[in-house]
Amino acid sequence: MGTLDEPREMDLAQVGWPFCLLEVKCALNAMAAGQVLRVRVSDPHVLGEMSRLLAASPDRVLETSDQGSHFLLTIKKG
């Protein structure tokens, strides 16, 4: 796990819904407030659902971006 300044990276491009959400929630639970998690996913549906579900938590989506073959979701632990 990285320091507060070093983002943690997760490649979930091959993990389907809802398992990718479980992986992200487990990773966030193990992180300290203020740490950043970057998640790579390939399914736009997963990106939308994850953003929607995280909106109801203390964790914040900082950025989403289309990288061509995948999407990158950047989350800050609340």
Image: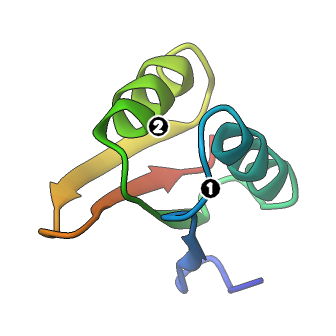
- Amino acid type assigned to the residue bearing label 2 in the image: Arg
Name which residue lies at 48% across and 64% down: 13
Q: Is residue 53 left or right of residue 27?
A: left
Labels 2 and 1 touching (C-beta < 8 A): no
Label 1 crowding class (10 Å Cα cut-off): few <14, some 14-19, many 20+?
Answer: some
Residue 40 percent coordinates (x, y): 43, 65
Kind of element beneath mark 1: loop
Name which residue lies at 68% across and 85% down: 3
Kind of element beneath mark 2: strand
Split into 4 quadrants, where in the image is the N terminus? Answer: bottom right
- Amino acid type assigned to the residue bearing label 1 in the image: Val
Label for residue 70?
Answer: none
The residue labelled by disc 1 is 15
Q: Is residue 6 above or below residue 12?
A: below
Name which residue lies at 62% across and 49% down: 77
The residue labelled by disc 2 is 60
Q: Is residue 38 left or right of residue 25?
A: left
Nearer-the-camera pick, 16 or 29: 16
* Furthest residue toward top: 56
Nearer-the-camera pick, 41 or 72: 41
Label 2 crowding class (10 Å Cα cut-off): few <14, some 14-19, many 20+?
Answer: some
Split into 4 quadrants, where in the image is the C terminus? Answer: top right
Question: Where, by quadrant of the figure, is residue 27 drawn?
Answer: bottom right
Q: Is residue 6 above or below residue 63?
A: below
Name which residue lies at 61% across and 64% down: 35
Q: Of marks 2 and 1, which one's residue comes earlier in the chain?
A: 1
Residue 10 percent coordinates (x, y): 59, 72
Q: Is residue 78 left or right of residue 75?
A: right
- Mark nearest the camera among 2 and 1 is 1
Residue 69 percent coordinates (x, y): 21, 69
Residue 60 percent coordinates (x, y): 46, 37
